Image (cartoon, rainbow, N blue to C red):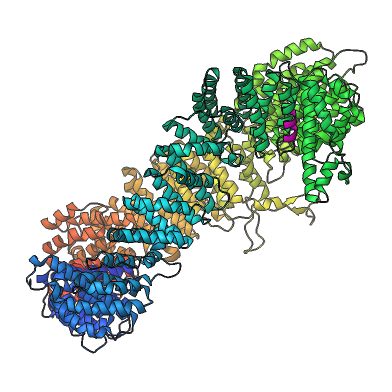
Amino acid sequence: MQSKETQMFGVLRSLAEKINDKDELVRANVALCLRNIAKNKPDEVLQTLCTFRKSQPKMPTNEVAQLLSLAESICRALNVDQVDPDTTVIALVDLAVQEMTHSNELIPDWQLPASQLLVAIGRNFCNRVMEGLTAKVQPGVAPNYFVTHTLGSLAAANPLAMVPYMKTCLTTQLPQMGGLRSDHLKQAFAYSLARFADAITDYLANIDRVEDQSITKETFSTEMDLAFTTIANVWLPETRDSQLREQVLHAISSTLSLLPPGRVETSSPGLLTTILSLRKKRHPLPVEATRCLEAIISHPEVKAWPPLDQIVAALTELVMEAPDLEQPLTIKSHYEALRCFHTIDKHFPDKLSTFLTQHMKSGSDKDKAISLVILSHLASAGHVSHLNTLITVVSSLLDDPSLKVKRAVIKVIVVLAHKEVISGNEGAKALRFIVNNCQQTGSTDECLEFRQTCRDSLVLICTTAPQVAPVLMPLLLKCFLQPDYLPLAGFLARCLALLHAKEPLEKLKWPEVLAKCVVLIGAPLPEVGVHTLNFMKALSSGTDGELSALLDCGSSKLIEELQDSQWSESKWEESLLKFMKSLVKAVSDPVWLSEFAEALTKLGQQHSNLFPENRNSQLSCLVSISVYKKDAMVANTLIHEALSAAKLPDCQKICASALGRCAGMEGEGHLQLTLSQLKLATKELPIQNNSMTSKYMPSFFSSITGGDKTKRNDQNLRFDRLRATLLLSYGEIATRIPGAVALLESTNILEWMLEQISQSKDQFVVESGLVALNKISESCSGLACRDEALDIVMAQLKVGGVVSLQCIASLVNLPPPVNPDTRLAYLKEIFSYVIEENSEDAILCAAFLDVPKKFLLSAGVNPASLDEIITLLELYLKNPIPSKRTIATKVLESVLHSYANNLSPGHECPSKLCFSTSLLALCIPRCTDISGACRRSGVECIRLAMEINTFYVGESQRDACKKLKTEISDEFMAKIAKESDPDTLYYCSTLISEVILRHLGSGQVVSLIDAVMLSLTDPEAGGSAGASVVLTALLKEKGHELYHQVPNIINAYLRISPQLGFESVKTGAVVSIGSLTQHHPKAVINALLNQPLPFSEASLSLWRWISKEEALANEVCSNLLCLLASNPLLEEPRDERAPRVARAVPLAAVNGLCVMLKSESNIIHDLSRSAFPELLSALLISLAAFIGACTPVNMALKGSKPRSSLSFVPNREAYGLVPGRVALEACLALLNASGCAHLEDVISSCRVDVGENLSSFMVATQSLIRGVIEVKGNIVPQLVSVINQNASSPEESTRITVVAVLAELVQWPGCNAVLLEGLVQQLTASLDDENPSVRQLCLQGLSHIANVAPHLRERYVFSVFVALLQGLEETPGEGKAAGMATEALSGLAAVLPHVTKQQVGEMQSSLVLRVTPFLTKETKSVRVAAFKVFVQLIICAEGCGGDAFLEQMPSVLINLLIGLSDTDARIVQDCHLGIFGLQKALTEEKFVTAVNKLKTGMPYEKVFTSLVPSLAEAYPDILHSLLTNACGFTKSVRQQTRACATSLIGRLCSFGDSTSFEMVSTKLTKLLDDPCPIVRATAAQSLSNLYTF
């Protein structure tokens, strides 16, 4: 027999084979196991790994890599004294070297782990590793890549130990460098050389800490020189590999400090040239090259002038481009490049300055830009020697077209400004360069960015460099006044204001500057106004007297207005007019005003690119001067300036307004002068619609345009603008000056205006003419050409829009009335255009409201004209789009208001209004519309309609109006418009219905009900809901008069019900019919009973209403129960394979009963409680019958002959009806109505679809009965009596229902002897039923005998116990028989505690044997019940089992421990209870103490850790039996059982003898090959525990 140590190598070998298992968890556990074992036995583990690798020469590469990585992790965690250097270390080094050098090809995935293993060993055993590596480095033999790479890595990891070996390594490797051809070998040599150099530098820096202090820099100078020569002169120029280049450059940087004296000086020119040649097109210099450049330039031996042009070219991209913060390499490269230039400037400042200056003068754009950037960097960094150079060079580069050069020049100018060196003409020229580029054209991102850079730079200079103010301020003022800088004027004003804060402005020619400022503030947004006004405040310091105070105070107020969040353009224009008026009146000097007006005129002439707002400000200021100073010369200048500006885009309204104000403003003006000038301009216009326009043009213009079509089109556009301005001007004059309309009509100007409107093809001209015509119509009492004008305006309706509507309203208001046919055609066209096409246009709709009212008043106030408009509005009032409904309702309100206000009695007045009820029905839905404006207008329409109706029925209109205004007040309408909550809307509908009932005539009720019934289909939810409220009120108050109308009303309701789109409306309609039913119930119920299945939604709603009537509900419920009891529930099947089909009549009864029970009424609640046993029994039996049954899809035709083949037709609507679902819903409704709603989830778990069985029904029924008797125990006798009537039913579903109910009633706490006797007899008799489900339910019911009172239980317990054992023997416990086994075992578990201990003790051993096979069944419910019985046998038979039971103790204990791993929490809990119960049989103190420390729910691993040591110590004799039983579970088909057994074996074996150890070790080793990864991982963990304990 082998010892524990002997077994170790076999186990380690097996673990090594699983290092590369396909499962990650297994690999992790195996590696952890080996690492744990290596903590105590590192030599054994590492040697096993070496041996295993040698025994597997064909091991895949990835597996070798895993093995080497594991060995490396073990070595990194070990100390020096833990490993045998003579055996283990040598074996590892040999293995790693062999793996690393096995192939001459480069295989990093394989060779890199070997290299890392050597580095890990070399941290503690550098000499051993070097012995292995130097053996592979032979003179004349091509070196291995990873050998060289490992030497470098080892030098970086352990530099102090490696330096003594470097001399030998370099001596061997240097001769091989010249013959290397492979880039990857060169890379390895360069990598190694760089680390060697760094290690030597580190060694020399710590020379006082090392043993060998004889090593100096000169020790390696010769070798470093040779290596430097090869890599710098051969490898670097020849290589094309980027990675090799980086390693070579690193090596060069590292070896420079170790080269012999003078070597760097002689090599630096060529080396610099080589490094700079590495730059490729469009690729910057690598960061290693930049670092190498800096190292060379900063070396003390480098005194010669470096090739700066090449350095600049190489570092251009790195210096010019800003580094990307998300890419650290670009940041490093950028600052390394700058460091190079700082180093060069430190050593060669004059030569660098000269070189850069030459480049800026004669170099390319790129050379100029980079030179400027370098100099600006150096100057801003404190190198003041370059400032004079920059001043001289900037002037020569200001005209350079390159954007790169310009950007660099801007940076330089900013630096010069802050260094206080800008002055004189050169300084002004440089600053003008920035100003000019602040408005550079171009829409590309680059141009926009450059323009913003210029502006930011100029602001920076103005705020932080006040010393340039003497040069910059005159320049900015000059540019501010020039037309070319108009787009930049606001920004220039900002800069001037900033400069003024640093140094006050000097006196200037204020009229010119002030005129420019006044024009600019006309368009103040986004920031022009604030900047200009701040500048005007600065101007105030240069004036005297009242003007200075006005500028200061007025500018401040205007700035405050601009900064107001509620700023508006119209308010701003008024403020500007007041400011200009104050400005003109504040100046008393006529010469200054003349100069100011001249400056304004000159500014308008020079600045053709003014914005319209700026032009308005200019003209408004001229108007103020001409009117308030009564200056005709300025007025004449203004008129010519306005007519000239009118030809410019977007200036027509502005110019017309200015001309109108010039003709008359505040009672003053120049009317005759203005009209004469306008008429002259009118005569100069060409004739419309003539292709030969040039024939009629002035000869001067014709000679200019010639045959150029583009010029002709442009001139036509300018003439159209002038024409629009003239039209608008006449409108302004007519508005401002009384009597001007007659003057216009007498001079044929009005005729000319109509001609322009009708003939012009330009939309703006037409709109301008319409605006002017509207103003003229509003300003006069009549026009001779009214009809002609109206036709022209209607023709231009869609062109003019709002203006056309306003003009139509004004023209229609003029006498005489419009022709009726023409009026109707006009109204149709206008309604279609506004409501149908443009209802969302609020402005257009507001203008439209006046038009129908004007047409109504023009036609006369009579029903025909009103009906005409209402007929046109009806479709729009019911439109689904809210905006269309709202505008239509507002139009109706406007029309009704005008109609009511203009009603007057007379002999020609009609005696009635035939359409009053239909008008009310149209308005009622609008009173509760979703739109607040629509609601308010709707309520007002109701009030006005009722007022009009009272007038026609003979009541006093004045009295009716007062009453209606009292009943429907203005406050109420305002509230309705604002509040939309349901209570408010309901109150609104109720109030309206009361008003209607109070004022409506008796003969109008029926027609109003019919009309309101149709209003229920309104497309808006609120509107149709309001109609339902009104309908309810009408039927409630007037229903007693409508007996003969009931059929028609019901038919109308059923007909429109499918069209009702909102639930609230459907509910309201039902309530309405309910109100009618209160008057005529029998007629309504007769109509309802004739509805087919499935019930329509309307029928269902009425069924629900019936359930709320007590007498009717009781009668219907009784009839339905009798029907279910006296009729078969299923149709007779044609054959055995035919599906089960529910009968139509019982299904309809259940459906109706379900609908009634679902109604939430107290009547149904009381009914369901009083008849609960009958209802529950009937519905459960119906549910059992309907589960899995099909729907009857045939329905008898009325009037067909019996047995006729044509007496049935398919009822396709019934296909979606599931009988079981209907019955289930009825059961749920009964529970909810009877106060057992908490049991709904129990019964709803039934699966009732077609083809389902009764398995879920049985479980749900038992749970339901259990819950019912808890809350309704008093119904049990009655329920037994009712349900027993069906015990002998031929239907299996009925018998299953009966047994399921009776089985649960056995455990009712209130069960007496008589009742229990009957239940037991019935269940015992049913044990012989042919249906297995019935027998299973009987077993379950008999097991409930354990829950009855003790004096009743003693009579039946043993006979039940025997019956359950017999049931257990009849079932194998698997497949379909698992249910019976589960019930038998569960029953035994329940009954067993009540059987006497003597009876149990006599059968304990046999019972254990009979139950044990069920502990490992696949069915979870069987296992749960079996463990329950198993634990009960342990607990119940305390001290009665005898020796036979004690012999079974190892098997019992192992079953309990293995059961702890089960996935079912109940089994785990029972196992814990069983372990606690074993204390009575296993009484050793240590075991008992360990058991008492256990906690319920503790994972089985912790249970094993706590319990197994105490068990082994207390009962060592049974360990072998425990191991034997546990090993049997490793063959289980359940993987969690095998995993648990594996873990338990590992725990137990650590306390066994050598025989047990060997057996378990072998078992666990085999389990490493288990198909389940969890078992394999657990086996590895157990082996770790086995060798760790």
Residue 647 lies in the magenta stretch: yes
Q: Is residue 520 left or right of residue 1408?
A: right
Residue in the picture at 14% in, 54% down? 1489
Residue 348 lies in the magenta stretch: no
Q: In which quarter of the image is residue 774?
A: top right
Q: In which quarter of the image is residue 66?
A: bottom left
Question: Which secondary structure class fits the magenta region best?
Answer: helix
* The one of 1427 and 193 positioned closer to us in this rendering: 193
Residue 427: x and y, percent? 45, 45
Report the quarter where the N terminus lies: bottom left
* The one of 502 and 766 positioned closer to us in this rendering: 502
Q: How many labels does the image show?
A: 0
Query: Is residue 1054 among what the camera can see?
Result: yes
Residue 1428: x and y, percent? 31, 56
Q: Is residue 57 above or below residue 438?
A: below
Range of residues picked out in magenta: 639-648
Report the quarter where the C terminus lies: bottom left
Q: Is residue 1125 above or below residue 511?
A: below
